[in-house]
């Protein structure tokens, strides 16, 4: 009997030992939850801290922004920035610009170019060619003609290179070089690259309104449409720039007025209209087409008419102009194409409405 009890006790001890070993082994196996948490921590890399510094587009008249493809090739990002436009340059936490050499695809050619990362219109994935921008700089306008450039912030380092009045330059935001400012610029027509040179600070203004107004003036000079040009000049003046920039705009308008006066048209002339009911026909020398304008004289061209076309007049200006040696009013009405008649032979007039110079018409 005692022998039997001893065997039972030994068996119980053995079973208890096995159970503890199983529990200990189980405790060494990580749970699925713990494993997932560990993997999650490992898969979250630290993100680099990015910041920006101001930059300026230097290429005249426009500089392009580029996008990098999956193959590393830069293609045009369908964004062109006007000369002097303020941009943001993407940098690391130490304010070092992100610069890389990549292949650029343009006009069927692929060439190596150096690019700097740019943030524009809220997007930081654009790139610009480093040769066309100034980093850590803001735009300013040169306000004295033939402003001399210095190699160093010293009165004895004068060069023979001059910057013309009204030119936009990029002024560095690094350091105090009083009484000088450090600039970058590109001088047309040969696009001379000016980098890290100096001019006297009193030779520039850096007001944002002045810069914007001057950009509008440059766009107006390049405009092919009278309507666009006049609207740009109007908008530039509405900004109420400084006297210096306002005078630049006035000088251009005076030049423009001289040209238009030679052609018999006054710029921004005011016209008043009186009612007139008539039908006239186009008479042009050598069969030239005649412009139909949205407003008298300098308005947008809405249509063209030919010799023999009809014009149903509903009004005319009280004022006259002289064009091609002919003095006449401007006629307001609707176009009727030659030969387009109704079933009764009457002239059909279209819904095209506008103004034509009366000197090019006859009854």
Image: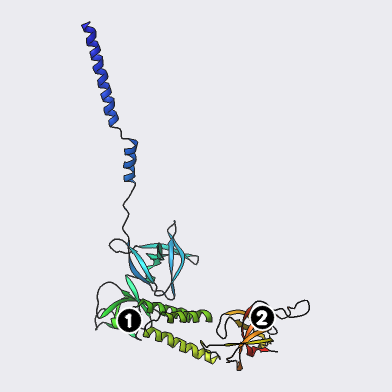
Number of the front mark, 2 or 1: 2
SS state under label 1 = strand
Sequence-earlier tag: 2 or 1:
1
The disc at residue 289 is none
Residue 53 rendering spot, x and y as whole percentages? 32, 67
Front residue of this view, candidates 73 and 305: 305
SS state under label 2 = strand
* Residue 303 figure quarter: bottom right
The residue most toward the front is 275
Front residue of this view, candidates 125 and 315: 315
The quadrant of the picture occupied by the C terminus is bottom right
Q: Residue at x 45, y 79 (%)?
A: 235
Per the model, the C-alpha gap separating discs 2 and 1 is 52 Å
Residue 292 rendering spot, x and y as whole percentages? 61, 82
Residue 248 rendering spot, x and y as whole percentages? 41, 85
Position of 105 relative to 204 (above/below)? above
Q: Residue at x 49, y 80 (%)?
A: 231
Crowding at dot 2, Cα within 10 Å, few <14 / some 14-19 / many 20+, comes out as many
Q: Residue at x 75, y 80 (%)?
A: 346
Q: How is colour applied across the structure in the image?
A: rainbow
Residue 69 rendering spot, x and y as whole percentages? 44, 58
Q: Is residue 180 visible?
A: yes
Q: Which residue is mark 1?
A: 204
Q: Which residue is mark 2?
A: 335
Position of 341 relative to 97 (above/below)? below
Q: Is residue 91 left or right of residue 292?
A: left
Crowding at dot 1, Cα within 10 Å, few <14 / some 14-19 / many 20+, comes out as many
The quadrant of the picture occupied by the N terminus is top left
Count of numbered circles on the image:
2
The residue most toward the top is 1
């Amino acid at each position: 009997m005692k022998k039997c009890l001893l065997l039972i006790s030994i068996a119980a001890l053995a079973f208890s030992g096995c159970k503890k070993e199983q529990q200990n082994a189980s405790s060494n196996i990580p749970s699925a939850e713990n494993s997932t948490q560990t993997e999650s921590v490992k898969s979250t890399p630290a993100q680099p801290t990015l910041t920006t510094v101001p930059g300026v587009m230097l290429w005249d008249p426009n500089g392009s922004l580029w996008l990098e493809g999956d193959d590393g090739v830069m293609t045009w990002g369908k964004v062109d920035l006007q000369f002097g436009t303020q941009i943001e340059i993407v940098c690391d936490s130490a304010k070092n610009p992100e610069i890389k050499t990549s292949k650029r695809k343009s006009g069927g050619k692929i060439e190596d170019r150096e690019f700097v990362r740019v943030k524009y219109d809220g997007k930081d994935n654009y790139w610009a060619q480093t040769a066309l921008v100034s980093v850590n700089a803001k735009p300013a306008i040169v306000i004295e003609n033939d402003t001399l450039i210095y190699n160093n912030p010293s009165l004895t380092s004068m060069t023979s290179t001059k910057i013309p009045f009204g030119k936009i330059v990029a002024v560095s935001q690094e350091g105090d070089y009083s009484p000088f400012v450090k600039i970058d610029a590109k001088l047309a027509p040969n696009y001379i690259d000016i980098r890290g040179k100096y001019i006297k600070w009193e030779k520039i203004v850096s007001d944002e309104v002045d810069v914007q107004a001057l950009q509008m003036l440059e766009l107006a000079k390049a405009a092919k449409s009278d309507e666009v040009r006049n609207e740009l000049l109007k908008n530039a003046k509405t900004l109420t720039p400084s006297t210096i920039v306002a005078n630049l705009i006035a000088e251009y308008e005076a030049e423009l007025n001289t040209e238009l006066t030679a052609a018999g048209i006054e710029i921004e002339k005011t016209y008043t209209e009186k009612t007139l009911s008539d039908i006239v026909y186009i008479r042009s020398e050598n069969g030239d087409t005649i412009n139909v304008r949205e407003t008298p004289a300098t308005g947008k061209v809405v249509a063209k008419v030919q010799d023999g076309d009809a014009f149903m007049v509903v009004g005319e200006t009280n004022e006259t102009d002289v064009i091609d040696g002919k003095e006449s009013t401007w006629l307001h009405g609707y176009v009727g194409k030659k030969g387009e008649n109704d079933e009764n032979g009457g002239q059909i007039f279209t819904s095209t409405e506008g103004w034509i110079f009366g000197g090019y018409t006859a009854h």
